[in-house]
Structures are given as C-alpha cells and as structure tokens.
C-alpha cells in the first residue's frame, strides 16, 4: 500500500492583483482634477504677485512725479502738453483711452514723463525726447528707476520709453496742470464710471468726489493719479468702477 495519498489539485480562484480599466481611468480623472485645482491656485498666486508689482510701480511713479514737482515747482511734462492742456489737467492715456473714449489729447502716451523722470535725453533707437539736452531735468536727477526692456510689448519701460504694467498695458497718468491740487482723470471723471448709480451726485466710487454736481466732474484731491487696467487689460466707459472690466483696475488713490 502506498504511503502517499493523492491530493486533488487546488485551483486559484482569488481576484487578480492588477488594476482594472475602470480603476485606472478613475485614478487618471482624479489626478486631472487635482492638477486643474493646483493650476488655478498657481495662477491666482501669480496674479496676486503681479498686482503687488503693479501697485509698487504705480506708487513709484506717483512718488517720482511728486519729487520732481518739489524740486522744479512744476510737473514733468513737455511744453506742447502744457500748451494743449492750458489750465486743465492732462491724462496720458495712450491707445487704451483712445479705443474706449474716441480720439482726444489723452491719446498721448507716458513716454515723455518717463524721459524726464529718468533723465533720458534720446530714445534708444535715436531721436530726442522731451528732455533733449536735459532741458526738462537740468539737475540731471534720476527721480524714477524702472526696468528697461527691449520689446515694446513687455512689462517695464520699452524702447519707445512707454512704461507698461505687468500685463503689457501702458500705465495711465493724470497730472494736475491746473495746479489746484485737484486731479481729473479723463476716464474716472465720468459719471458713468465714478458716479453712484451713474449720477453726478457726490460722493462717487473710490473716494472720488463731484463737488458741484457738474456733469462728469469727479475728481481726486491730490496732484497725481496713476492707474493700470489690471489683469484683463480692458476698461469699460459705460460701466461703474466696481463692475466688469473696471473692477480689476489698480489705482494709486485706493489702498
């Protein structure tokens, strides 16, 4: 008699240790959702950093203009702009305001202000600036230090001497050429933008006031207004300052 008893062969019936197609697709979906969430957080952090940078640029411009005024008793503008403005304030609005409001003196860009504040006598490509031969900055002082860039679409001061914000849009600058310490920006003076309910009643948005109810006469009690169109690079003359394209604008007179 055999000492060994034949044992029946056992078959494995347990589940495979591998992943099913459904499980793999589920994991991929979850990873995609997490990546999208992370990208949104990163973009938000980047936008916050760019807004901080824009606010610093704006503060530097205001400080530089005020310092120039303190030294020379006037604002850093060309004779032609002073002649155009007469006894009115002047806004360097560039194509941004021209596109929004139509043609006007505010189509001038901020390059002459930069040339004077940075004591630049000639454009990088040649040709004199408004500060030719240091005529507008005889002490040859550098009131503003800004990053110079080689492309006119990049943030910083381009080869055209236009100072652009972190999104590549020129900064808007308004100076009190009436010298009454009240500044009227061509965009923000409008009731449709700064008036509560679109009216000329006082006060308006962002601390601006309309002292006498004159149409489109909202003003800032100060000598200089500087602002950026913000991340969306757009403005809307028919919308209140706290709505739509105007909501993300970055303003020197608002903390």
Image (spheres, grey):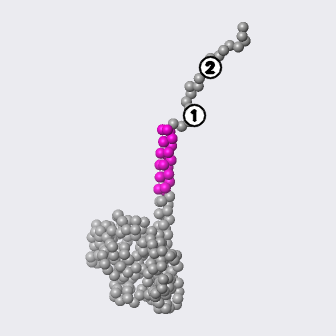
Quarter of the image holding residue 8? top right
Is any atom of residue 106 visible in this view?
A: yes
Of 241 and 221, the residue lying toward us:
241
Quarter of the image holding residue 1? top right
> Residue at left 42%, top 66%?
231
Q: Which residues are magenta?
A: 21-41
Residue 243 forms part of the magenta stretch: no
Quadrant of image for the C terminus? bottom left
> Residue at left 40%, top 65%?
232
Above or below 186: residue 236: above
Q: Which residue is mark 1?
A: 17
Is any atom of residue 255 visible in this view?
A: no
Above or below 226: residue 38: above
Counting from the top left corner in percent of width and height, residue 179 is at 38, 86
Q: Residues within 10 Å of mark 2 (few under 14, many from 20)?
A: few
Quarter of the image holding residue 5? top right
Which mark is drawn over residue 1?
none
Q: Which residue is mark 2?
A: 9
Counting from the top left corner in percent of width and height, residue 234 is at 37, 68
Counting from the top left corner in percent of width and height, residue 28 is at 50, 45
Q: Earlier in the sequence, mark 2 or mark 1?
A: 2
Q: Residues within 10 Å of mark 1 (few under 14, many from 20)?
A: few
* Callout 1: SS: loop
Left or right of 177 on screen, residue 159 = right
Residue 30 forms part of the magenta stretch: yes
> Residue at left 50%, top 76%?
150
Q: Main secondary structure of the magenta part?
A: helix
Name the residue at the top extreme.
Answer: 1
**Disc 2 to disc 1, C-alpha distance:** 22 Å
Of 40 and 5, the residue lying toward us:
5
Q: Nearer the viewer, mark 2 or mark 1?
A: 2
Counting from the top left corner in percent of width and height, residue 45 is at 50, 60
């Amino acid at each position: 008699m055999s000492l060994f008893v034949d044992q029946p062969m056992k078959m494995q019936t347990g589940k495979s240790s591998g992943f099913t197609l459904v499980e793999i697709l589920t994991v991929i979906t979850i990873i995609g959702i997490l990546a999208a969430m992370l990208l949104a957080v990163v973009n938000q952090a980047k936008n916050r950093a760019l807004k901080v940078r824009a606010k610093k640029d704006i503060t530097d411009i205001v400080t530089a203009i005020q310092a120039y005024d303190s030294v020379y008793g006037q604002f850093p503008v060309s004779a032609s702009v002073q002649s155009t403005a007469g006894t009115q304030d002047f806004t360097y609005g560039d194509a941004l305001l021209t596109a929004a409001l139509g043609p006007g003196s505010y189509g001038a860009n901020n390059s002459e202000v930069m040339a004077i504040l940075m004591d630049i006598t000639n454009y990088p490509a040649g040709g004199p600036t408004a500060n030719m031969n240091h005529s507008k900055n005889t002490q040859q002082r550098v009131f503003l230090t800004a990053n110079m860039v080689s492309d006119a679409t990049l943030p910083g001061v381009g080869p055209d001497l236009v100072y652009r914000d972190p999104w590549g849009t020129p900064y808007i600058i308004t100076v009190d050429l009436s010298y009454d310490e009240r500044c009227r920006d061509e965009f923000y003076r409008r009731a449709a933008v700064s008036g509560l309910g679109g009216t000329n009643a006082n006060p308006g948005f962002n601390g601006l006031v309309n002292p006498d109810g004159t149409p489109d006469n909202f003003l800032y009690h100060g000598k200089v207004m500087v602002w950026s169109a913000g991340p969306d690079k757009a403005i809307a003359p028919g919308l209140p300052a706290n709505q739509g394209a105007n909501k993300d604008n970055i303003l020197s007179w608002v903390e």
